[in-house]
Amino acid sequence: MEPLNDQELNKILDQWTAPAAPRALKFPKNQSGWRWLLQGSIRIPAPVAVALVIAAGVWLYSTRATTKPIAHPKPVSLVDFQPVKQMQPRVIGRADEAN
């Protein structure tokens, strides 16, 4: 069998008609597009679903981490410090009692 040239291929292609879409791909006549959006489903491979969940988690974590306000401590100056007025030392334990 000899290979076909471009003109012969174009003639065959003009005669070809695409098959009808499978019934599973068509909207039912009694179901509107809005109803399909609310109740319909789309099948995706499990690795794609896992990758989407991980990407969404990373995105949410990164946006939350960047928008979180950073708490700065109040500045402390030595002017606020006061000397102790009365010292009351208290002995909690003795070194010779530890043995």
Image (spheres, helix red, strand yellow):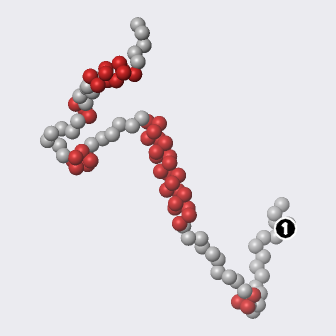
Nearer-the-camera pick, 12 or 30: 12
Image coordinates for residue 45, horizontal then vertical, percent: 42, 35
Q: Residue furthest front?
A: 7
Of the pair 94 and 31, the residue shown nearer to us: 31
View extreme (top): residue: 1
The mark total stands at: 1
Q: Is residue 51 visible?
A: yes
Q: Residue 43: x percent and y percent?
A: 35, 37
Q: Is residue 16 above or below residue 47?
A: above
Name the one closer to the observer, 79 or 70: 70
The residue located at (76%, 90%) in the rendering is 83
Q: Nearer the viewer, residue 21 or 34?
A: 21
- Residue 98 in the image: x percent, y percent? 81, 63
Please state which amino acid type lies under the numbered disc 1.
Ala
Q: Write down the quadrant of residue 94 in the picture.
A: bottom right
In the image, 11: left or right of 60? left
SS for dot 1: loop
Quarter of the N terminus within the rendering? top left
Residue that mark 1 sits on: 95
Q: Is residue 1 above or below residue 51?
A: above
